[in-house]
Image (cartoon, grey):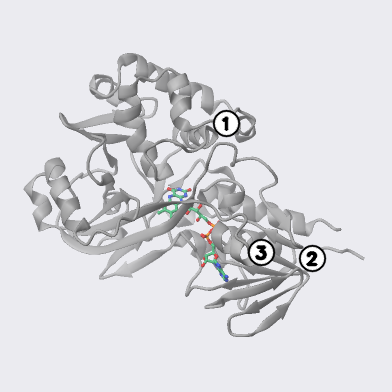
Amino acid sequence: MSAVKQQVLIVGGGLAGLACAVRLHEAGARPLIFERSDDVGGRVRTDHLDGFLLDRGFQVFLDAYQEAGALLDTAHLELRAFRPGALMYHASGMHRIMDVFREPRALLTSALAPIGSFVDKLRVAQLRWRLTRLTTEDIAGHEDTTTERYLTRAGFSPQMIDGFFRAFYGGIFLERDLQTSSRMFEFTFKMFSQGSATLPSRGMGEIPRQLAARLPPGTIHLGAQVTEIQPDSITLASGDHFQGDAVVVATDASSAAELVTADGTHEPAWRSVTCVYFAASRSPLGEPIIALNGTGAGVVNNVCVPSDLAPGYAPPGQALISVSVLGTEASADLESRVLDELEAWFGRTVRDWRHLRTYRIERALPRQAPGTGLTGPGYRKEAGVYLCGDHLWSASIEGATISGLRTADALLQPS
Ligand SMILES: Cc1cc2nc3c(=O)[nH]c(=O)nc-3n(C[C@H](O)[C@H](O)[C@H](O)COP(=O)(O)OP(=O)(O)OC[C@H]3O[C@@H](n4cnc5c(N)ncnc54)[C@H](O)[C@@H]3O)c2cc1C
């Protein structure tokens, strides 16, 4: 008789929990998801406001993600790509730094942009050449240090690190000190070199929705806060009790620490971000590109206009502007500080923007210190339960998906 786990109770309906459930269901097992909030998606959700689509924090799907790309029906997501590169706002004005391998026509403007030296630009090309030839497994085997030290060792000038990498990777790692693992830097640099940063045309929330739609009715319990777990059962805040063959804790790292170890042993530090949305009658960028603050001063890290890529993000005749501010400073006048700052970037037009909503996301990414990511099985078994989530592989959509899939594969092994 097979001892494959049939009834699997999954705590958390983020991407890790959903990926785990889809793999289990498609292999013939019976997963049940218990999600405490009012919808699936976890950190990947989209709100609707007056015809605008507001992702809960600016984030992108990198279409080079192998496992998430294979699991999802990306054609149906109608991914819309950002141009490969960025606009960099500096004291001398706005400059364009493009990935010239994919936009060769931008070679001259990128070469002439006063950000880093010509040697820095050659080093970017070398890094690109080297990393695109490596697998994620190769990268996982590399010595891990901070991204800042890695870039210095790679020979980049302080001007290039301060004027480009801090802003670009600030938006990805949600910190500008570049203390995140260099393996994570290599992984994301490879992904950006091999594919595009994209948005689904109906919002990032379509990603979890698509996975949820592959599960049979009755699989997902919403508003179901799990308060106690055992290796074969869970209890909800409502007092309801469910019995199964296995329990998977697919929550964020802090909730997992509370549920499983109770003493917070694995409680991680978090990177936080604030996303401020504005509506305007026209886009200040006019193209699908990310604009970055390369000055090293001010609160804004990056700006983009999702409706320039995917018009469905805004009602006809309007533009949706997304501004990311690192951290979650509770300043009452944050929106006006953002506008004051962006007036230097875009001129008086910002005075006509209408504030839509501000998201302060305290627990956006687990801090990925050197030595913590891209290695190991992608899940952990502790006190008889399985743990999965982005904190067990890499803090990304790909990382959460891989972790969920690996956990399901482990459960599907006859024991
Ligand atoms: C602002 C922001 C920007 C990002 N940018 C990018 C990006 O550009 N590209 C990229 O690839 N990734 C990005 N990420 C990271 C990516 O979104 C996450 O790594 C990934 O979504 C994590 O998925 P998860 O399933 O591991 O965890 P989560 O999404 O946190 O899901 C965990 C779920 O568990 C539920 N839960 C917790 N406790 C309980 C309980 N007791 N009972 C029941 N349910 C519970 C939660 O409600 C949640 O739904 C970003 C994240 C944020 C927030």
Q: Secondary structure at mark 1?
A: loop
The residue positioned farthest toward the top in the image shown: 119
Residue sitting at 65 percent across and 60 percent down? 20
Rendered image quadrant of residue 138:
top right
All told, the count of numbered labels is: 3
Q: Position of residue 137 (x, y in %)?
A: 64, 34
Q: Position of residue 262 (x, y in %)?
A: 64, 65
Query: Which of label 2 and label 3 is nearer to you?
Result: 3
Which residue is under mark 3?
Answer: 260
Residue type, label 3: Val
Check disc 1: other Cα within 10 Å, few if <14, some if 14-19, many if 20+: many
Residue type, label 2: Lys
Q: Secondary structure at mark 3?
A: helix
Residue 115 horizontal side relative to residue 240, left or right: left
Residue sitting at 48 percent across and 26 percent down? 150
Residue type, label 1: Asp
Which residue is under mark 2?
Answer: 5
Examine the rendering and report whether any part of residue 315 can be seen.
Answer: no
Residue sitting at 58 percent across and 53 percent down? 401
Q: Position of residue 335 (x, y in %)?
A: 20, 57
Residue sitting at 13 percent across and 44 percent down? 346
The residue positioned farthest toward the front in the image shown: 263
Work out whether mark 2 precedes mark 3 in sequence or the reverse, and give the earlier one: 2
Cα distance in 3D space between marks 1 and 3: 28 Å
The residue positioned farthest toward the bottom in the image shown: 239
Work out whether mark 1 precedes mark 3 in sequence or the reverse, and give the earlier one: 1
Which residue is under mark 1?
Answer: 144
Work out whether mark 1 precedes mark 2 in sequence or the reverse, and give the earlier one: 2
User: Where 49 falls versus 360 (above or below)?
Assistant: below
User: Where 211 falls versus 62 (above or below)?
Assistant: below
Check disc 3: other Cα within 10 Å, few if <14, some if 14-19, many if 20+: many
